Amino acid sequence: MEDNQKFINGTWYDEQYDAKDSLYSIHYIQNNQPLWAKQMNQHCVDLTIAYTGISPDAKILDLGSGVGYYMNSWQHRGFDVCGIEISRIAVEASHQPKMICGSVQDMSCFKDKQFDLVYSAALFEHIDQSIVSEVFKECCRVGEVQVHLISQEKGSDISHININSAEEWAWKFYSLTTEHKIILIPNLLEMGHPFIIIYPEEKELPYQLHRYVKNYDKEGIIIMDRKLYQQKERGDIDEETL
């Protein structure tokens, strides 16, 4: 954990956004978002809207907002969205009045169930394993439904400190709650970012998800099941069974 402290406290990100020759600065501070990236972000947001069936007046929390690109996509569809980002420099560069500087490890600035949807894209691979449980529990506290897109590739970004398969992430989240359904859509995007949807156990899945669940063999959807989880914990099944 000591080696990753600079990622946990955010100092590494401020250094990268501030360094003129770093990729973070070049891509996010010095240049505008390219069209292909805008379209990809909008596609992810639109799929989230479709899968969760959230209403147009839903309140959204965007985690690890960076310079606000995904916030822009939510706003483009008319949603009320807040953001939280650990880098002060990124927050200032975003020009987003509803983005605050803070850590997703402690979101005490937000009330319980303040948001209808908690959303993250390319966040959890940056979260040190030692604090994943805290971050997940905070997400569950502040929001009703969650959708997380998680990169499964380390690439050249050294801040990708927690790389797991889509199934490993889904089972990790499932192990941390008894109050939520976990729906994994592992191969939705060509870029390989799985959708992990976390839905309150007592609520019926929206029609949009039911449609895909009925065809889960075809669509590649996995719904985490408590009995299946217990079998996995006992070692009765392995990942290839899923």
Image (spheres, helix red, strand yellow):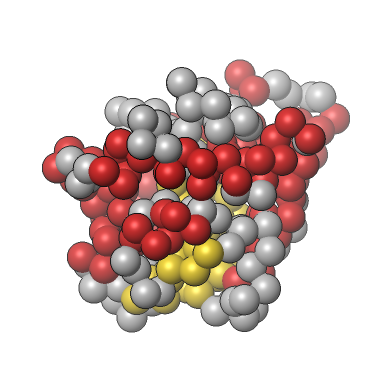
The spot of residue 236 in percent (x, y) is 79, 24
Question: In which quadrant will I find the N terminus?
Answer: top right
Q: Is residue 108 visible?
A: yes
- Depicted 21 relative to depicted 50: above or below: above
Give how far across and how far down residue 196 sits, in percent: 50, 46
Q: Residue furthest right?
A: 234
Residue at 68% in and 57% down = 105
Residue at the image point whose x is 30% and y is 38% from the top: 27
Tell which of 36 and 20 is nearer to you: 20
Q: Is residue 24 above or below residue 141?
A: above
- Residue occupying image coordinates x 62% and y 30%: 161
Res 178 quadrant in image: bottom right
Query: In this rendering, is residue 240 above or below 35?
Result: above
**Visible in this render: residue 196?**
no
Marks counted in the figure total 0
44 or 156, nearer to the observer:
156
Q: Position of residue 163 (x, y in %)?
A: 59, 28
Q: Residue at x 58, y 63 (%)?
A: 102
Q: Quadrant of the C terminus?
A: top right
Q: Quadrant of residue 22?
A: top left
Q: Is residue 141 left or right of residue 13?
A: right
Q: Quadrant of residue 34?
A: top left
In this picture, residue 59 sits left or right of residue 113: left
In the image, residue 185 sits, relative to residue 241, either above or below, namely below
Image coordinates of residue 45 in percent, x first then y, are 31, 55
